[in-house]
Image: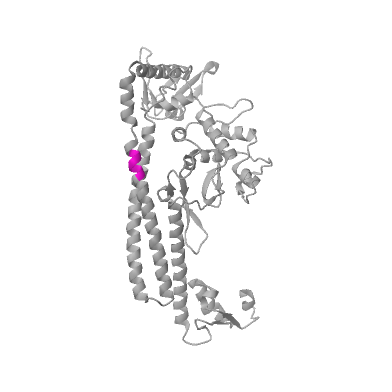
């Protein structure tokens, strides 16, 4: 129509009212008061008497355009508030489920584990906690011809598209697992049963541009659905990811593992992570990373044989277990003092209930504001009365938002404390008679290890910091 108008193929545009042409003030100015004048096009709105051919009506059209734009903005804010309230109430509103989950057939706002995909997620965590690096896991999954999350969704008839897949030029019908996909799965708290939404937002209701929100602004509903990964394994994975242990590329044959203490061993002098190196006859050593990087200029080259460290850590862990078994009663009392989480759990439940109540109240206020706006449009209340109502609604909503933010922060702190207390008790009974040291045992017992320099007698300080 606009192209025809520019070519002078007609003289009049007739609409029910001005808002049917556009509710965007910029477009109204661009066309009604500029381009249509140049093209000799007359615009007529029947119900609101908008007529560019009538003199003196420009201000009225501009006011109508501004009111129409406000209406769009208010509707956008109200819709956003309602959607946020639904998310805070645990309703899933995403287009695609996280890999490992699917929509509940009986409730489209809930997600449930998808057994085949959930099994792959569990295998990823199992491989990672047994010592495999991220790149090695990606190659294992590709070698076993497990469909990637993108291919899996497409195989279930979903119209899902991943531009990265085409860009990579993969020809395999199963796709090729990438390091980023594996890493994202290892980081995703959705597998703990927590619903996480609102990671992104539009910059404006007028634009389709989307930006990422800070983590503090995400909408997180704890214990919302059935978990795929237990909290203990998830925390172990996060600890290892946080330690930035080396990832290994797979070679032909057996997939390599990182060493038992990857990311946990630091230099006692400078605090940098010690890195694995090979000596004669492929003997493995751990050496100060800073010294290696600067060729000994900024730190002494602290070195320890990996075999020596392994034997020492194993000896000390066995001593801890023997002490526990030898004085079981006192040891259990000590660990119980760290591990009693009942009070924290009760307080967390109260906080969650408070969040649910504030979310409901906010939704009620948003509906009330929307109803008052409609009353104003329909002439049931005056503009002055509406503004008073709006100020009251806005003030109460602002107060609720502040309360919600404080309650969310308190709930997050409680959750963190519960997680920390979940780490304080090592699996003494499970590992009472272990035959050899494994990644699982190290991850359950050891927080980090410091290595010092050798003295004149050949002794070397080794400080082990436990998780209990």
Q: Main secondary structure of the magenta part?
A: helix
Residue extending furthest toward the top: 457
Using the image as rendered, state which of residue 91 and residue 141 is in the foreground.
91
Q: How is the image coloured?
A: one colour
- State the image coordinates of residue 237 (x, y, percent, origin top left): 47, 34
Tell me the quadrant of the picture where the C terminus can be found: top left
Quarter-wise, where is residue 410 in the image? top left
Residue projecting furthest to the front? 106
In the image, residue 151 lies in the stretch drawn in magenta: no
| Residue 348 among magenta residues | yes
Q: Is residue 176 above or below residue 13?
A: above
In this picture, is 198 found above or below 180? below
Residue 397 is situated, as x and y percent measured from the top left of the image, at: 35, 60
> In which image quadrant can residue 41 be found?
bottom right
Q: Is residue 251 positioned above or below 58 on the image?
A: above
Residue 36 % position (x, y)? 56, 79
Residue in the image at 33% along x and 54% along y: 402
Quarter of the figure with residue 333: top left
With respect to residue 86, does 60 lie above or below? Answer: below
Q: Give left or right: position of 367 versus 340.
A: right
Residue 14 in view in this figure? yes
Quarter of the image that includes the N terminus = bottom right
Q: Residue at x 48, y 63 (%)?
A: 205
Task: State which region is magenta.
Answer: 344-349
Q: Closer to the camera, 89 or 400?
A: 89
Residue for point 44% across, 25% down: 442
Residue 415 horizontal/vertical position (percent): 37, 40
Residue 288 in view here: no
């Amino acid at each position: 129509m606009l192209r025809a108008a520019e070519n002078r193929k007609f003289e009049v545009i007739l609409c029910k009212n001005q808002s049917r042409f556009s509710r965007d003030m910029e477009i109204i100015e661009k066309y009604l008061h500029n381009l249509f004048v140049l093209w000799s096009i007359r615009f007529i709105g029947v119900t609101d008497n908008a007529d560019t051919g009538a003199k003196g009506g420009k201000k009225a059209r501009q006011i109508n355009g501004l009111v129409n734009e406000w209406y769009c903005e208010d509707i956008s804010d109200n819709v956003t508030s309602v959607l946020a309230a639904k998310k805070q109430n645990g309703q899933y509103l995403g287009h695609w489920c996280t890999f490992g989950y699917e929509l509940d057939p009986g409730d489209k706002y809930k997600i449930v584990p998808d057994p085949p995909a959930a099994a792959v997620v569990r295998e990823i965590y199992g491989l990672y906690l047994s010592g495999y690096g991220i790149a090695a896991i990606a190659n294992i999954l590709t070698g076993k011809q497990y469909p990637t999350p993108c291919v899996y969704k497409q195989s279930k008839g979903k119209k899902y598209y991943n531009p990265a897949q085409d860009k990579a030029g993969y020809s395999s019908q199963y796709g090729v697992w990438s390091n980023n996909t594996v890493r994202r799965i290892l980081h995703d708290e959705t597998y703990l049963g927590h619903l996480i939404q609102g990671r992104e937002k539009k910059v404006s209701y007028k634009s389709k541009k989307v930006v990422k929100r800070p983590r503090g602004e995400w909408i997180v509903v704890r214990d919302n659905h059935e978990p795929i990964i237990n909290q203990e394994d998830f925390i172990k994975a996060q600890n290892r990811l946080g330690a930035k242990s080396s990832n290994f590329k797979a070679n032909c044959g057996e997939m390599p593992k990182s060493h038992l203490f990857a990311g946990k061993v630091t230099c006692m002098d400078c605090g940098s992570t010690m890195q694995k190196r090979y000596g004669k006859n492929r003997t493995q050593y751990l050496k100060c990373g800073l010294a290696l990087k600067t060729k000994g200029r900024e730190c002494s080259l602290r070195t320890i044989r990996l075999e020596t460290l392994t034997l020492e850590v194993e000896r000390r862990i066995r001593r801890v277990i023997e002490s526990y078994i030898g004085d079981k009663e006192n040891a259990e009392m000590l660990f119980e003092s760290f591990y009693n989480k009942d009070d924290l759990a009760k307080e967390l439940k109260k906080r969650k209930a408070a969040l649910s109540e504030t979310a409901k109240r906010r939704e009620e206020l948003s509906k009330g504001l929307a109803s008052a706006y409609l009353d104003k449009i329909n002439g049931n209340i005056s503009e002055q009365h509406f503004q008073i109502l709006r100020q009251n609604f806005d003030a109460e909503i602002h107060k609720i938002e502040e309360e919600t933010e404080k309650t969310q922060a308190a709930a997050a702190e409680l959750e963190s404390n519960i997680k920390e207390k979940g780490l304080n008790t090592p699996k003494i009974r499970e590992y009472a008679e272990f035959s050899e040291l494994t990644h699982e045992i190290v991850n359950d017992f050891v927080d980090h290890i410091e290595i010092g320099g050798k003295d004149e007698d050949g002794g070397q300080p080794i400080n082990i910091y436990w998780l209990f």
